[in-house]
Image (cartoon, rainbow, N blue to C red):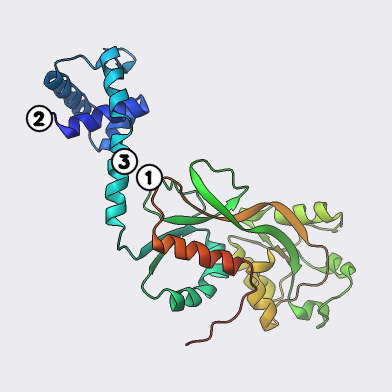
Amino acid sequence: MVSLRALHAFSLLAKHGRAARAAEDLGVTPSALTHLLRSLENELGAALVIRDGRGLALTEEGQRLSSNLGNSFDQIEHAVEAFRRRSRTELRISTLSTVATRWLIPRLPDFQDKHPDIELLISTSMRVVDLDRESYDCAIRLGDGAWPHVERHQLWQEDLVVAFAPQLSNGDPNPDIKLLDKLKLLHTSSRREDWPRWLNGTGLPHPDQTSGAMFESRNMAIQAAVAGMGAIAIDTRFVEQEVAAGHLVVPDWPRLSLESGYWFVRNANRPLTRPVSSFHKWLMEQSQQPFKAHEAT
């Protein structure tokens, strides 16, 4: 009987066109892949690949076999994955640190109340995780939504407003915008363009755009603003708790809408599981609502 592992090795070579990538996907060395291909050729009594200085290529017989196999192994993998996930209640989520701490986590008690059987595993990273090759079920990403091979749904369009501690305006929640000239501007190293973008986009000048401190994260910059160190340009959703508590004010100054937004994304090639579907539906509902402190039930 023909070895299924050897057939799988051949199908991966036909799929990727590169022996190194096929070997990586199969979890073997390139030499082991070559051994499997030779074994398959011996079993079938036909030359399936051509070996030359540039690597491996399919012969006419190899192309015929590849055509007959089609996407059989992809279908097998999807079937096995669906079986493994049939009763899975674990949900692995990747997102940005600011989204997790400032928006998602404060709302999660509501999700847990509604779906107590779903265990959440949340990881934060600045990089765009590969939903094809990594073990995440879904992600919340920042960008324009132009990512290949994913199902995407926009949660909200990013915007920038000005926020600062109420003592900087003597308790006035909506002071004249001339106050901005007297405020130091707080910056985040990963979002250095936020203040220049807001000032240029609104057409408002500032005597010293570099007057305030620089922080590693937006979480730190928000805390500095609460402490009265200056003003921040920030997405309104990330300071809604501080504004509600009276620790920050967002005056009625211009709001700048950006082209980027926050998106729910998942691998479009994977079966849609109940945990992912439930989380997606809940996220879409939450994205349309202001933050409300959770009430224990």
Q: Residue, x 86% and y 70% (percent of image)?
A: 179
Instruction: Point out which mark residue 75 bears.
Output: 3
Question: Which residue is tagged 1?
Answer: 133
Relative to residue 24, is residue 160 drawn left or right?
A: right
Which mark is first along the chain, 1 or 2?
2
Where residue 135 sits in the image (x, y, percent)? 36, 52
Tell me the quarter of the picture where residue 202 sits: bottom right
Question: Which residue is tagged 2?
Answer: 1
Of helix, strand and loop, which one carries label 1?
loop
| Residue type at numbered disc 2 | Met
Q: Residue, x 87% and y 54% (percent of image)?
A: 203
Relative to residue 58, is residue 95 drawn left or right?
A: right
Question: Outermost residue toward the left?
Answer: 1
Residue 258 vs residue 265, the one in the foreground: 265
Which mark is first along the chain, 3 or 2?
2
Q: Residue, x 46% and y 65% (percent of image)?
A: 278
Residue 295 vs residue 71, the one in the foreground: 71
- State if disc 3 and disc 2 touch (CB < 8 Å): no
What is the C-alpha distance between the residues marked 2 and 3?
A: 21 Å
